[in-house]
Amino acid sequence: MQPPPRPVPSAGLAIIAMGVSGSGKSTLGALLADRLDCPFLEGDDFHDARAVAKMRAGRPLDDDDRWPWLDRLGEAVARSLAPGRPVVAACSALRRSYRQRLRDAIGAPTRFVLLDASQDELLRRLTQRSGHYMPASLLDSQLATLERPDADEAVFTLDAVAPPDRLCEIAQAWLADGARP
């Protein structure tokens, strides 16, 4: 049985489910968007063909690959914001500068939910996943790139090993409570 709906966050709020590959950000993002009855944007859909080919070949992205991707995603989130509805997106947002780039492109209040898991758990998930261009061999580079959020960022960290429904409930409660980190 689905829990009773919680209050929807204020209009014009962008919610980014973030974390390294395999953390569950797409699963949480889609579930949260469904519960909030708002659009969901999959960050992977905004990579250009060259970046996808690079990752598929097992080569990590660099900032030159990521800046235009973050701009495209941030602009799409901004276009999707509507009165009375938030927008949820999934994006790795690994560095503080990437999170700031998204905030700047979105131009509206933005909150991040970081899904955190051990390297062993992430590797287990990635090796069981099929049909995704991101190989498990790139996990180390993503973990090396990840800058854990500072206290002054609006980022809420969740243990990614919890069931997706529970993660969604916790994220909804955080958002309903004003989304303070």
Image: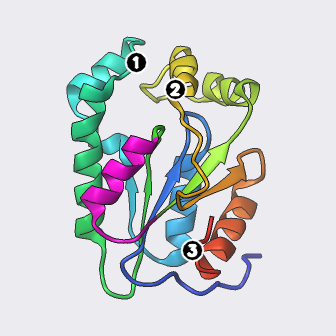
Quarter of the figure with residue 81:
bottom left
Image coords of residue 175 (percent x, y):
59, 74
Residue 142's disc number? 2
Q: Which residue is mark 3?
A: 35
Q: Residues within 10 Å of mark 2 (few under 14, many from 20)?
A: some
Which amino acid type is marked by label 2?
Gln
Distance from disc 3 to disc 2, alpha carbons, whole Å, reads 29 Å
Image coords of residue 112 (percent x, y):
52, 58
Q: Which residues are magenta?
A: 96-110
Distance from disc 1 to disc 3, alpha carbons, whole Å, reads 33 Å
State the SS at label 3: helix
Q: Residue at 71%, 62% (x, y): give it.
A: 165
Which amino acid type is marked by label 1?
Pro
| Residue 15 magenta | no
Task: Using residue 17 as the reference point, say whether residue 4 is left or right of it.
Answer: right
Q: Residue furthest front?
A: 152
Mark 3 or mark 2, whichever is nearer to me: 2
Q: Which residue is mark 1?
A: 60
Q: Residue at 59%, 35% (x, y): give it.
A: 22
Task: Using residue 113 as the reference point, say whether residue 122 is left or right of it.
Answer: right
Tell whether label 1 touches label 2 (CB within 8 Å).
yes
Tell whether label 2 touches label 3 (CB within 8 Å).
no
